[in-house]
Image (spheres, rainbow, N blue to C red):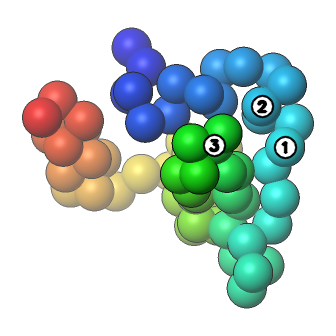
């Protein structure tokens, strides 16, 4: 399942446009519509390592379903 806001990230050419955020602590993309998609460093690390606090994971999953 793809969250609509993140759908552009499925496009390899768009994904390649990633850049570091202004503070260097996030990964960001700017959509053709001018909307920003960003992930903070902590979220990227937790996703990569598969390390999620169960309460945080449940909170995120609950909001994805809304």
Task: Find residue 56 and report its horizontal and vertical position in percent.
Answer: 28, 56
The spot of residue 45 in percent (x, y) is 64, 57
First of labels 1, 3 by sequence position: 1
SS for callout 1: loop
Q: Is residue 42 above or below residue 6?
A: below
Marks 2 and 1 in Cβ contact (< 8 Å): yes
**In the displayed structure, would residue 2 be above or below residue 17?**
above
**Which residue corresponds to the image point at 59% horizontal and 51% vertical from the top-left?**
34
Look at discs 1 and 3 and give the one toward the viewer. Answer: 3
Location of residue 43 (image quadrant): bottom right
Q: Tell me which numbered mark, 2 or 3, is placed earlier along the sequence.
A: 2
Give the position of the C terminus as an image quadrant: top left
Q: CA distance from mark 2 to mark 3?
A: 8 Å
Left or right? Give the position of 42 relative to 48.
left
Left or right of 62 on screen, residue 60 = right
Are circles 2 and 3 on residues that touch, CB within 8 Å?
Answer: yes
In this view, which residue lies farthest toward the front? Answer: 33
Residue ID for mark 1: 17
Q: Which mark is residue 31?
A: 3
Q: How packed is label 3: few (under 14 Cα within 10 Å), some, or many (20 or more)? A: few
């Amino acid at each position: 399942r793809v969250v609509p806001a993140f759908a552009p990230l499925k496009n390899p050419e768009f994904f390649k446009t990633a850049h570091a955020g202004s503070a260097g602590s996030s990964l960001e993309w700017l959509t053709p519509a001018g909307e920003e998609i960003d992930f903070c460093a902590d979220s990227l690390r937790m996703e990569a390592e598969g390390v999620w606090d169960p309460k945080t994971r449940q909170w995120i999953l609950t909001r994805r379903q809304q």
